[in-house]
Image: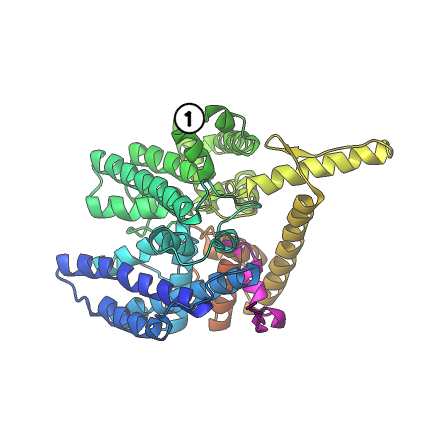
Amino acid sequence: MIGYVIGRILWTEAVLLLLPAVVALLYGEPALPFLGPVLLLLLAGLPFRKKPGQTALYARDGFAVVALAWVLMSAFGALPFLLSGYIPSFIDAFFETVSGFTTTGATILTAVEPLSQGILFWRSFTHWIGGMGVLVFVMAVLPMTDGHGMHLLRAEMPGPSVGKLVSRMSDTAKILYGIYLVMTLVEIVLLVLGGMPLFDACIHSFGSAGTGGFSSKNLSVGAYDNAYFDVVIGVFMLLFGVNFNLYYFLLIRRFRDVFRSEELWAYAAIVGASVVAIAVDILHMYESFAQSLRYSFFQVASIITTTGYATADFNLWPTFSKGILAVLMFVGACAGSTGGGIKVARIVILAKTSWGDMRKMLHPNAVTTTRFEGKALTDKHIRSVHLFITVYLLVFTASFLLLTLNGYDLVSTFTAVSACINNIGPGLEVVGPMGNFAGFSWWAKLLLSFDMLVGRLEIFPMLLLFAPSIWKRRRIIRRM
């Protein structure tokens, strides 16, 4: 069954690769870099075309499918870069593709404008595919399991909790992708109405929808120097950083559930406070407060949603402003959004449980209950958040120590790991908004690729690939 699902995923990627092939043909470019991988993907999925009799997928199966699917899709998705000759090294192409699918936006390219239109389209389209989730997309168009799709959704969707919006998982996936598609189209239309070329509007909408950050310009969104584009893209980055369940609640007119969302209010408060603090701090660098507010708003929206677009070189900003942005790298967007990072929900839960524990130190006999989103949190929920933070810090520390062997300065090394594991893209110094990851060694790029996958898949699917127990064959006893 794992092979069957992965085979369907590879065939789905083959179909998706036809879109940049069409774009290449429209611009008079060779389509072979895309059609070659299409053929390979179809052949790779061929041995798994037959649906097995036992179609149930359980928790460990879900973790295995998600982790393997993302690695294989990135490996095959790297082939267009390789075959086109724009990225001659497979490891570099793999890094670029992982960065695309995981919506990180970190790049090894020193210039993107020389790339063909087809390659630019595929590079950013990977953001849109990976933003909501590869498995969510496949489940929306190809229902494949006997009611156990929740394990796939939980293994792929970011955040501490994932639930069904409706009774059937395939319908939940369709609702999520329907909202995702409509919001993307609205952003494209607004950018085109503002004067942005249709191709560039698609590229930047893919990036902000998936909170990825790949651009068709070397200077990112800053190349346009247009306040209207800054506001539209900035607002949509923040909107895509909101839990998509809340949009569904809006559609069915459950307005009270939306406005009572603790995570949404915390998210808005963090964004508002950060924008104002940075705008005041960088005021001396710009002509007016309105201008400093504009640049502050865009960079805060880009970093907290882990998109990675830039309209200013914040590497030149005061230390206080850079410090706020560094903290926002770890906070991330909301659970159930397309953003990365630890997630606002976990931050709120940690703050509440910490405050509750401190109160118990003063009043040992008091009975305290931690509530979140109007519900009492069970010990299981609290332990899962603590477990995530603990493993996250262990993986981050191990990656940081290993990357120091590459010889870069402390800030570049620290923010390189931060940018990759939190799926942000730019860091500071060498990997700042005007820098790139080209100078890292081949093994460092593989390590950072692993970090990007770890961050996007919420750590455990990737780590469990190395657990021997996940590969033990399950014995199924059939009753006569």
Q: How is the image coloured?
A: rainbow
Please tell me which residue is depicted at 22% across the width and 40% down the height of the picture.
196
- The answer to whether residue 225 is seen in the rendering is no
Q: Is residue 463 magenta?
A: yes
Label 1 amino acid? Arg
Classed neighbour count for the residue bearing mark 1: other residues with Cα under 10 Å, few (<14), some (14–19), many (≥20) = few
Name the side, left or right, on which 132 lies relative to 281: left
Is residue 140 among what the camera can see?
yes
Q: Is residue 242 magenta?
A: no
Q: Is residue 72 left or right of residue 367?
A: left
Residue identified by numbered label 1: 253
Q: Position of residue 65 (x, y in %)?
A: 48, 64
244 sits left or right of 346 in the view: left
**How far across and down, in percent of the image, does residue 222 sit?**
33, 43
The residue lying furthest to the front in this view is: 480
Magenta segment: 455-480
